[in-house]
Amino acid sequence: MAFIVKKKISGKIYYYLQENKRIRLNNGSTKVKTKTLAYLGKTKDEAKKRAKEFLEKNLKDKKIDIEKTEMEKKEISIEELANFCKRKGFVYISAEIYGGFSGFWDFGPFGTELKNNIKKEWWKYHVTERDDIVGIDGSIITNPKVWEASGHVASFVDIAVSCKKCGYKTKIDKSEIKNAKCEKCGNEYEIKAEFNPMFTTEVGPIKENSIKAYLRPETAQLIFINFKNIFENSRLKLPCGIAQIGKAFRNEIAPRDFLFRSREFEQMEIEYFINPLDEKCPYEIPNIDILIYSSEAQEKNLEPEKMKISEAFKQGIIKKDWHAYWLATELLWFKNLGADMNNFRIRQHKKNELSHYSTDTWDIEYKFPFGWKELEGIADRGNFDLSQHEKFSKKDLKIFDQETGKKILPNVICEPSLGVERAFLVFMFDSFYYDKKRENIVLKLHPKLSPIKAAILPIVKTNKKIVQLSKKIYNELKKNFNVFYDESGSIGRRYSRQDEIGTPFCITIDEESLKKKDVTIRDRDTTEQIRVPIENLKKILEELIFQEKNFSELGKVVNTRKKF
């Protein structure tokens, strides 16, 4: 079925004709993809007229669903999102009853579920579904010599600055001292001091005998110091990767922008190792279009250019095939989970931004309400870290390469590093819609990410038999899914509550359910409803969450819409 959608872009209203189509992916699975058929104009009446003309000319068998004309993408500030997250149980200010604690946040019931689902999908995509990557879970506090070897103790230094005009405080990198301007008013910064953002602690109960240690500022070093054991225990072969999800801590001078920059955060990171004598990537670069902002374009003050990542590699914009592969692979993860690629770009580091060990570095950036900011870094580290740990520990970290029959010290060709909280923000912003007809927020999260997969709603709570059946269904489904039972308020109000926390499906039990042993399932995004047998409910819900079939294919459609 084709449908009209209204989008608000930069404050202006535009209407489009779209339809959902099922496509087959390279791995054999299928997913539902929304395809834009035509631009319809700037008013509802014009959109209806053009849609009808388009379908009569091109798709005579299609009907138009006009319900979606009330749905619009809602642009909100980071402060508005923070307030929404608090109000709906996603994220709270840590220790708010004591006035809070800057840079620290507590995740509420729905935020915890969303965060866990993000980590689960990342791990499945990067580790479980691949043969070349394994995972670890390293210690938050480790021997302080690790951070001496990595250079964090001596060189992990930021510059604390304050705007000479407006007084805005922040930090900058040493490489930015000459050119940095205040991001609030554009005036010059005054340098206040250098500081090391690592948190220190003491290990040992008696202070005189304790050892100064650090809360880890990144997860990567735990991978490097365990590399040889992991490689041999897992029987890995180059090229291969080691993944980790875990907490990191940085004593930021000015935590800001909600979860974007905080003092405690979680990283999802991979160190990908190759034979330094064989740097060719054996994998096909995923086919994805994106805005590409090369270092040359930045130096010439040109706009980013949209192109396929594979084409950017062929043209030499992206120098390494491994970088092209990982950039496209990471973007595809976001895209498959419903993120809007129009809000993404990749930016190449300029020469003065490159780390001393890196020949080329790219950032995946996202258009946050406060501008384009780094979301995920893709860098090659060479063998810098393994060499440093060999030097400081006096241990041999070389591995035996079966292909060459020699011992080698691998290079890290890519280090895909993504903050869980920043991914959390992306999915929240891209799923935030407002439905004028329903007069409520609709959080259009991908079903895999949604905190609650389905709500069980008895049509009335005064009918004991309906309530009894509803609770029976709820107790059965919660063995396999995170489901929610709600019998309080009108059915419309209960739908709205679930829309606002991103629940993709609402299951309603009524008098017909008692007679025919079936229930109604409502789709969050379209409000379409289907009738399905109770005995098939678990299987159908699974197919809906994994988008294996179109919604209307899974049951008898309940006519609740107007069509023309």
Image: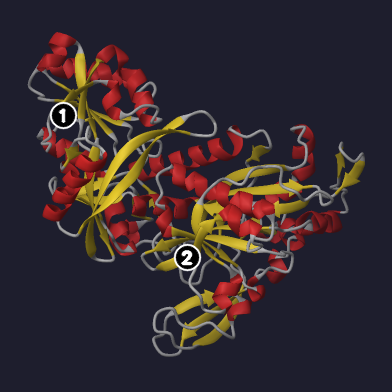
Q: Quadrant of residue 403?
A: top right
Task: Please identify, in this view, whether the residue under mark 2 or under mark 1 is nearer the observer.
Answer: 2
Residue at the left extreme? 462
Q: Quadrant of residue 132?
A: top right
Amino acid type for the residue under numbered disc 1: Glu
Q: Position of residue 539 (x, y in %)?
A: 36, 19
In the rendering, which numbered label is found on residue 479?
A: none
Q: Residue at x 90, y 41 (%)?
A: 404
Left or right of 222 on screen, residue 198? left
Left or right of 26 on screen, residue 92? left
Secondary structure type for disc 1:
loop
Left or right of 127 on screen, residue 240? right
In the rendering, which numbered label is found on residue 487?
A: 1
Residue at the front extreme? 57
Q: Residue at x 54, y 47 (%)?
A: 287
Q: Nearer the viewer, residue 167 or 128?
A: 128
Q: Residue at x 56, y 79 (%)?
A: 300
Q: Name the residue carrying label 2.
A: 373
- Is 32 situated above or below 186? above
Q: Position of residue 272 (x, y in %)?
A: 69, 47
Q: Is residue 246 visible?
A: no
